[in-house]
Image: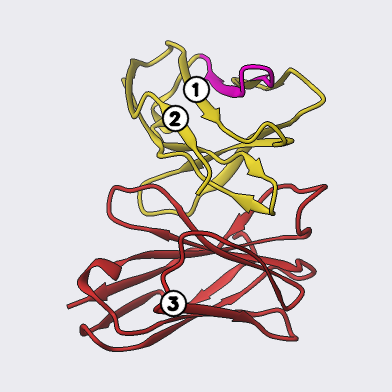
Chain colours: A red, B yellow
Amino acid sequence: DSGVTQTPKHLITATGQRVTLRCSPRSGDLSVYWYQQSLDQGLQFLIQYYNGEERAKGNILERFSAQQFPDLHSELNLSSLELGDSALYFCASSPSAGGNTGELFFGEGSRLTVL
Amino acid sequence: GENVEQHPSTLSVQEGDSAVIKCTYSDSASNYFPWYKQELGKRPQLIIDIRSNVGEKKDQRIAVTLNKTAKHFSLHITETQPEDSAVYFCAPHFTGNQFYFGTGTSLTVIP
């Protein structure tokens, strides 16, 4: 158990809909990262937050948005869903924002299926 | 995103043989070089990492070597076992607080 909690574990929805994925980082970790992993694909970096502020943005679509709340949990919002958005979405946390960076601790992922 | 190339994409070895996976990155300012293992249906987990002030690090059957001049680092697994079968990802840390993962190497250890 990494200490990172993601909900829901599985989600099935229709095209055009909107969903919210939730992540609770390890106790004490200030950084949260979101990654998308499509079938048989690598891990695509989406976005990173540190202590409530956006710190880095990767290949995140405009239809997607995220935020980190004062209690440090984070939410990834996916809207106007398309079939190609079907993927496993991972959240990871780490103590630092960069500089003396280190290990990313991953949650179990949220599997999104868009029909 | 930043350029991270990982080779080979698939690798099959006999149990007991060695496996080597290479990761090439583009950002010369990178200073942290981890390798993650992802078993089927599971989350990625760190198996070994190295920082830019050392050239090699070893942990039992696993080692990582770094060549900062050439901008690549490699994962070495010796005496491979069936439980080493998984997908391995490199994830060099880039300036701007980003971890870009390589495309992954699917390792199969044949008993």
Q: CA distance from mark 1 to mark 3?
A: 33 Å
Q: Is residue B72 magenta?
A: yes
Disc 2, SS: strand
Q: Position of residue B17 (x, y in %)?
A: 42, 10
Q: Amino acid at mark 2?
A: Gln
Of residues B2 and B45, the one nearer the viewer is B2
Q: Chain of mark 2?
A: B
Q: Is residue B100 magenta?
A: no
Q: CA distance from mark 1 to mark 2?
A: 6 Å
Local crowd size for mark 1, using a 10 Å CA cut-off: few (<14), some (14–19), many (≥20): many
Horizontally, residue A70 falls left or right of residue B4, namely: right
Disc 1, SS: strand
Assign the magenta stretch its main secondary structure: strand
Residue shown at 56% from the left, 65% from the top: A47
Would you name the residue on which mark 2 appears? B6
Horizontally, residue B106 falls left or right of residue B76, namely: left
Would you name the residue on which mark 1 appears? B22
Q: Chain of mark 1?
A: B
Measured along the vertical axis of the image, is residue B94 above or below residue B76? below
Would you name the residue on which mark 3 appears? A64
Q: Amino acid at mark 1?
A: Lys
Kindly indicate whether the residue at mark 2 contacts the one at mark 1 (C-beta within 8 angstroms).
yes
Give the extent of the magenta segment: B66-78
User: What is the residue that sits farthest to the top in this orientation?
Assistant: B17
